[in-house]
Image (cartoon, rainbow, N blue to C red):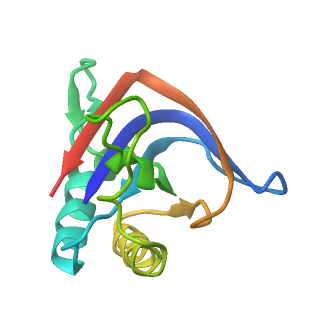
Amino acid sequence: MRVLVQRSSEASVLIDDKEKRDISFGLVVFVGFTDGDDISKITYLAKKIANLRIFPDEEGVMNKSLLDFGGSILSISQFTLYADCNKGNRPSYIKALGGDKASLLYDEFNKELSKYCEVVTGKFGSDMKVTINNMGPTTIMLER
């Protein structure tokens, strides 16, 4: 399981050029799944994301978590986190988990994240245009 976390002052997703969902402040989380991913990995990473100390304290030091600072999460399914470009210029996605299983894990991941804060989601398997105002920029890759 791979997760790319970006600290954001605002973010939105436009789904299939029709439906817009947004957050005003918090984290944008891109998540991809592979074989062997399960609820224990989901639980671990959801807790890690909620407690990741990447927000500024009173002195401007990244010392506060989303739980301390407040905000929401925009969660986006992202199978391309498992892109492999070692054999040429065209990425292979063979390590990415297939749609039905990945969709179930994505739902479980969002359910687990929602124990900590408001979660706004993209739509699994849809065409999504994501807009992010990345604060910092601060981008963290997590893997389990």
Q: Count every numbered label the image shows and give the total.
A: 0
Screen quadrant of the N terminus: bottom left
Image coordinates of residue 79 in percent, x first then y, are 43, 55
Q: Quadrant of the C terminus?
A: bottom left
Residue 139 falls in which quadrant of the image?
Answer: top left
| Image: 3 above or below 39 | above
Task: Give left or right: position of 45 versus 97.
Answer: left
Compare residues 98 and 57 and report the one nearer the observer.
98
Name the residue located 27 percent from the left edge and 53 percent from the top edge.
2
Is residue 23 left or right of 27 when viewed as pictured? right
Task: Reply above or below: 108 against 84.
Answer: below
- Image position, residue 4 (x, y; %): 34, 43
Residue furthest out toward the front: 88
Q: In the rendering, at what x and y percent does residue 90 appear?
A: 44, 36
Q: Residue at x 34, y 26 (%)?
A: 138
Image vertical order of residue 105 relative to residue 134, above or below: below
How far from the left and from the top, in percent, is residue 35? 24, 71
Residue drawn at the location 23% of the way across and 27% of the way down = 62
Instruction: Tell which of 24 and 96 is nearer to you.
Output: 96
